[in-house]
């Protein structure tokens, strides 16, 4: 059980860090974030919204307990990642660099599975 808990916190910490670091340019409206998001067809006001949602979701998966909020946070982060991949494929077609998204999506699923294993609900 101790190995599961340590693995859970390492994977969850890495995943939350990835999401937090990807949220900072969105919240600050960096030119790269604006170019990327508007290039996908989303309005400019959506950028800050999605950045704040990533930060809140990352915080929620790091806070112990609050299981219902944590479930919603995992779902929201999943939709963010899958939506980003889908939007990129829909506008630009498949690009080889998109395969990088397998890593954070895998970390999300692994974190979610280990959280349930840790709490005994698997």
Image: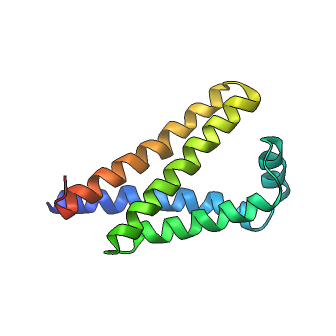
The quarter of the picture where residue 2 lies is bottom left
Q: Is residue 57 left or right of residue 42?
A: left
* Residue name at image x 35 percent, y 54 percent: 111
Q: Is residue 3 left or right of residue 70?
A: left
In this rendering, is residue 94 above or below 83? above
* Residue name at image x 78 percent, y 54 percent: 33
Q: Nearer the viewer, residue 43 or 4?
A: 43
- Point out residue 59 in the picture as x, y percentages from the top left corner: 49, 71
* Residue name at image x 82 percent, y 53 percent: 43
* Residue name at image x 44 percent, y 62 percent: 72
- Point out residue 53 in the picture as x, y percentages from the top left corner: 60, 65
Q: Is residue 67 left or right of residue 4?
A: right
Q: How is the image coloured?
A: rainbow
The quarter of the picture where residue 23 lies is bottom right
- Point out residue 85 in the picture as x, y percentages from the top left corner: 61, 38
**Residue 14 visible at all:** no
**Residue 57 visible at all:** yes
Quarter that holds the N terminus: bottom left
């Amino acid at each position: 059980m101790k190995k599961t808990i340590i693995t859970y916190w390492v994977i969850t910490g890495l995943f939350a860090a990835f999401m937090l670091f990807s949220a900072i340019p969105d919240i600050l409206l960096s030119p790269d974030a604006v170019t990327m998001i508007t290039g996908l067809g989303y309005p400019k006001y959506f950028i800050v919204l999605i950045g704040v949602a990533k930060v809140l979701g990352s915080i929620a998966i790091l806070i112990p307990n609050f299981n219902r909020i944590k479930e919603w946070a995992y779902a929201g982060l999943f939709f963010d990642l899958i939506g980003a991949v889908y939007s990129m494929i829909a506008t630009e077609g498949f690009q080889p660099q998109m395969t990088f998204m397998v890593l954070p999506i895998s970390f999300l699923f692994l974190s979610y599975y280990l959280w349930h294993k840790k709490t005994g609900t698997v």
